Structure formats: C-alpha cells, structure tokens
Image (cartoon, rainbow, N blue to C red):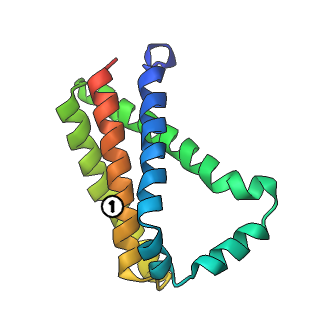
Amino acid sequence: MAFVTVNWLSILLAAVAAWLFGAGYYTAMSRPWLAAMGKTLEQCKAEEAAKSGLARYAPFILALVGEVIMAWALYGILVHLKTFTLRAGLISAALIWFGFVLTTTTVNNAFAGRKPMLTAIDSAGWLGALLIIGAIVGAMGR
C-alpha cells in the first residue's frame, strides 16, 4: 500500500470517532466495568492520584494511537479487497473483531483469571470502535 495514495483523513476521522465512542461507552459502563475489575471507585481514584502527569494520560494516548493503527490496517485490508463501501467496511470490521479481538481478549482475560463480564464489556467496546472505523473508512474510500 503506497503511503501517498492513502486517505489519511478517513483514517484519522475514523480513529477519533472510535476514540470518542470509547470515552462515551466506558463512561456509561463505568460501574459494571469497575465491578468486573473487582475495584471500587475509591480505589481507582487513589490509583489515579498516585500517577504523575503523563502517566495519567498515557492510556488515553495509547488508545488513540491504537485506533489510528486499527484504522490504517482496516484501510489496508479494504485496499487489498479492492472495495471501499460502507458494507465492506462494516463486514470486514466485524470479522476482524470476531476473529482477532474477541478471541484475544477472551484468552488473555481467561489466563489472567478475570471475570467473564470484563471480557463482555471490553469486547463490546472494541466491536463498537471497529464498526465505527469500518463504516468511516469504508464509506470515505480512497
């Protein structure tokens, strides 16, 4: 994939939209997510207070960088499929989520002994993010 022909605007818009979705999703799911993590709000606040300035923002920055990479990778898949449509973007995103994200999250959380609800919450969040990325990248095309 030649970098000069990449629609970087679609990739960046998709990543930012997915990142904003994640912010809203985890805000709405904060109580069940905390329960699935086995933590209280007070514990999380204490952990945040103990972090330095950059360490507080690192997870948010990593999430955005990860979503840019996801959008770029999905764009590359659509280039190889030679099809840029909303439908192709959504189907590709759903298959990537099911084949790679859901499976990886499930295995990692199982080995870490985490609650199944954490896998459900996190996997649903990534499904939403990937569908948004797929819709935007697919619809905006090359």
Task: State the count of labels.
Answer: 1
**Amino acid beneath label 1:** Ala
Point out the residue furthest to the left here.
87
For the point 48% across and 22% down, the residue is 8
* Frontmost residue, 83 versus 9: 9
Q: In this view, does 34 lie above or below 1?
A: below
Q: Name the residue under label 1.
A: 124
The answer to which image quadrant residue 47 occupies is: bottom right
Relative placement, left or right, of 106 versus 38 is left
SS at circle 1: helix
Q: In this rendering, would 84 be left or right of 105?
A: left
The x, y position of residue 99, in whole percent, is 29, 57
Residue 106 makes an appearance in the image: no
* Relative to 100, residue 44 above or below: below
Crowd band around label 1 with a 10 angstrom C-alpha radius: few (<14), some (14–19), many (20+): some
Q: Quadrant of the N terminus?
A: top left
Q: Position of 119 compared to 4: left or right? A: left
Is residue 140 something one can see in this rendering?
yes
Residue at 22% across / 30% down in the picture?
Answer: 86
- The residue at the point 36 percent across, 37 percent down is 74
Q: What residue do we see at 62% from left, 56% from top?
A: 59
Image location (x, y in percent) of residue 137: 34, 29
Residue 81 percent location from the top left of the image: 24, 29
Quarter of the image for the C terminus: give it. Answer: top left
Q: Residue furthest top?
A: 4
Figure quadrant of residue 102 = bottom left
Q: Where is residue 70 in the image (x, y as percent from the top left)?
A: 44, 42
**Foreground: 22 or 65?**
22
Above or below for 2 versus 17:
above
